[in-house]
Amino acid sequence: MKRKLFLIVALCLCAGMITGCGKSSSGSEADTGSSQAENTNSAAEPQKESIPFEKTIGVWTYSDDIVFHSSDGKRYALTEDTAGTVQAQDGTSYAVQDCDYKLITIVNVSDTTLNVKEGRFSEAYVGSKDYPDGYKTMMIAYQKSDLFDLDQLEEAVKGGGTPVTQEETTAETVSGTEEVTAEPETETETETTVPETTEETAETQASETSAETESESEAGNTEAEAEYAAIYKKLEDFLETDNYKQKDPGNRSLEVFNYLHNLADSNIEESSITNDTAKNEVSFKCYEKYLITINNAEATITVTEE
């Protein structure tokens, strides 16, 4: 009897130990699984590379765009303006205004190049599936410019430096002229008297010169007056840039191809932009009836109407 009781107690103890081990093992596995899930989620999160804005302070250019990254953490556009508050080293005056390009990410920066992802607005994209707000996302490679004094730009951003207006300049000129020409009437009449024959000759020459100028203007301004004039002018300017001139025809074609896509002009049929690598020609259709072809071996632009 005692022996049977001993065996029963022993069996109960063994069963209890087995159950406890099972729970312990199950708990460890659950804990391990939870820990692995946390590590997996952590590893799945993208590692965002962020370049601080203050590392990009300076003037950056892309094609005809000039963008100033200021120490106040904002971007400003520089546009050529005779009444501007900033002068470049070549003496040209520029105005400073808010830049309407939406900065998304600063990808990387070096002493000469700034690569950013930014949004550029086009009315044609408003309400579209990919760009409902109208800002088309692009990767832009800016080049560093040293044509401007950064301190002067910072002052312009803060509102310093009042430009001399055209009215003030005119007033000063008129005032100065009155002081210089204030002479006795008799002398003035004597000096300004011109024989009739001389006046007639001057009028004839001016008329002939005007006629020649008008004739040249009519012959040479066909593109300037055309419906596609703005697009044509942008292409002309782009073909004059060092970035274009210093490349071989193949790379020129690639530059023009990318430039046209980055323009995001609603009048250009983006799907029609073609790069013929065999001919080193890039062509596209605009305003539904014009075919513009850029020969990148000769750096020429041809327009045909379909």
Image: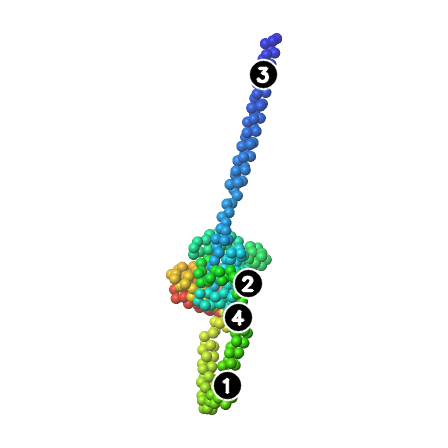
- Let me know if residue 266 appears in the view: no
> Are the residues flagged by discs 3 and 1 in contact, CB closer than 8 Å?
no
Q: Name the N-terminal-most of marks 3 and 1.
A: 3
Task: Give the class, few, some or many, for how many residues have Cα within 10 Å of label 2's Cα (few <14, many ≥20).
Answer: few
Q: Name the N-terminal-most of marks 3 and 4.
A: 3
Amino acid type at mark 1: Glu
Q: CA distance from mark 3 to mark 4?
A: 106 Å
Disc 3 secondary structure class: helix
Amino acid type at mark 2: Gly
Label placed on residue 2: none
Nearer to me, 75 or 306: 75
Q: Name the N-terminal-most of marks 2 and 4.
A: 2
- Provide the residue designation for mark 1: 183
Residue placed at 52% from the left, 42% from the top? 44
Amino acid type at mark 3: Leu
The location of residue 244, given as percent across then percent down, is 41, 62
The location of residue 227, given as percent across then percent down, is 52, 70
Disc 2 secondary structure class: loop
- Provide the residue designation for mark 2: 159
Label placed on residue 164: 4
Label placed on residue 11: 3
Residue placed at 52% from the left, 61% from the top? 155
Q: How is the image coloured?
A: rainbow
Question: Most extreme residue toward the bottom, as rendered?
Answer: 196
Q: CA distance from mark 2 to mark 4?
A: 14 Å
Q: Is residue 49 above or below residue 224?
A: above
Amino acid type at mark 4: Val
